[in-house]
Image (tube, grey):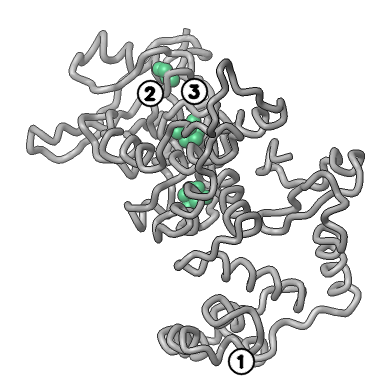
Amino acid sequence: MAEFQLRLRRFDPESGEAAHWEQHTVDLEEHHSVLEGILQTKARVDGSIGIRCSCRAAICGSCGVRINGEPGLACNTHLDHAREAAIAAGTDGVIVVEPMGNMPVIKDLIVDMDAVHWKKIQRVTPWLINREPVPEREYIVERESMVDVTQTMACIQCGACVSDCLSMEVDPGFIGPAALAKAYRFVGDPRDDQHFERLDDLADDPQGIYDCTHCFKCVQACPKEVNPMGQIMRLRRLAGSDHEITDPNNGRRHEEAFTSLIRGYGLLHEAELLPRSYGGDSWFGKFHPAAGKELLASLPVVIKGLLRGKVNPKTAAFGHKLPKPALDSVRAIFDKVEGKSHSKRAERYELNLYVTGYDEDEHHASEPSTTTPEQGSDK
Ligand code: SF4
Ligand code: SF4
Ligand code: FES
């Protein structure tokens, strides 16, 4: 047995009092969970502590909290690990537990999942819409197709990703990581009949797939390795590249401008990115009225950057200049993944979030160097 210090955030909106912290000592084994610590405190010291839990085995997803500032499952976090993290965070080993973010607090460590998380899940039509004709017995589905959606099916709806989503913090209307991962679960399922409609809807929504800023927070937060950001990128790839959906949010045009600038310059030419995203992917894009309007709106920021020395006028005007061998290497990556004979290549793989291609043979497709860790089982 060992002693652990827990600092719990207490808040009861109905009391009219402000939130406050309470510190308690618990006696438990090191491998016991933070949830055990909270439940021991509740049983021995104060029965009014609010915490939601059920399975105590990282399955039901109901004990999501923030521990030492990071979202996670209280039942899946060992006390000794939490104490180590607390020491690293400079709290003298006191384990700080507070409710998840981006959701209103009902009481103490319990947040209102209905108001945010479940509402967003409902937004993406979270059920299968049968492909017709419905077979008399069962649909026969390729094994690979189910492997493709298995990662999203591992979601236990804990809300940890929602808690720390930076886009949602700025724009609470953003559909969010958990719901968009759920959307991929059906877009990737061959039995579903509404792939295009779902993608079109999510691309069209200003708070849909193009509202994510790739901050990776949801990837780090997820206890089940669902990789919500990766699923959002896959939705974008399907919407933009496969279904050629051009969205009113300029998401697809922005991606195209981004990749073509990297191909052209080797590094991002920031001054060209905005006009091309709005006015079309060429040097002439800046003369399009839509691009002109955006450029005018961004002038104060540009001038401020110039005055403060944050923007180099020469680089802003002409872009970064890479040595030719380096530029050739960048272009060789594009040539390899885009290739000239897509149709002859059987298997597609992803080198990063935006560039897709088809591998030449199975041997290469299985090389770990062709994917980034966040793509997990994208093949
Ligand atoms: S990567 Fe996107 S969805 Fe995930 S937390 Fe960041 S902004 Fe939110
Ligand atoms: S994606 Fe991961 S973090 Fe988000 S709700 Fe599902 S299991 Fe929890
Ligand atoms: S109590 Fe079920 S996931 Fe923690």
Q: Give the left or right position of residue 327, taking residue 65 as reference.
A: right
Sooner in the amino-acid sequence: mark 1 or mark 3: 3
* Percent coordinates x, y for residue 171 in the rendering: 35, 57
Foreground residue, 282 or 4? 282
Residue at mark 2: 63
What element does badge 3 sit on? loop
Element marked by disc 2: loop
Classify the position of ligand 3 by quadrant: top left, top right, bottom left or bottom right. Answer: top left
Residue closer to the observer: 214 or 15: 214
Badge 2 amino acid: Cys
Q: Position of residue 342 (x, y in %)?
A: 83, 56
The reply to whether residue 94 is visible in this rendering is no
x 60%, y 23%: residue = 139
Which numbered disc covers residue 313? 1
Label located before the other in sequence (2 or 3): 2
Place of residue 230 in the rendered image (x, y in percent of width and height, measured from the top left): 60, 45
The kind of residue on which mark 3 rests is Thr
Q: CA distance from mark 1 to mark 3?
A: 50 Å
**Residue 38: which quarter of the image?**
top left
Label 1 vs 2, first from the N-terminus: 2
Q: Which mark identifies residue 77?
A: 3
Which quarter of the figure is the C terminus placed in? top right
Q: Is mark 2 within 8 Å of ligand 3?
A: yes
Residues at marks 1 and 2, CA–CA distance in whole angstroms = 52 Å
Q: Is residue 290 left or right of residue 12?
A: right
The 10 Å Cα crowd at callout 3, few under 14, some 14 to 19, many 20 or more, is some
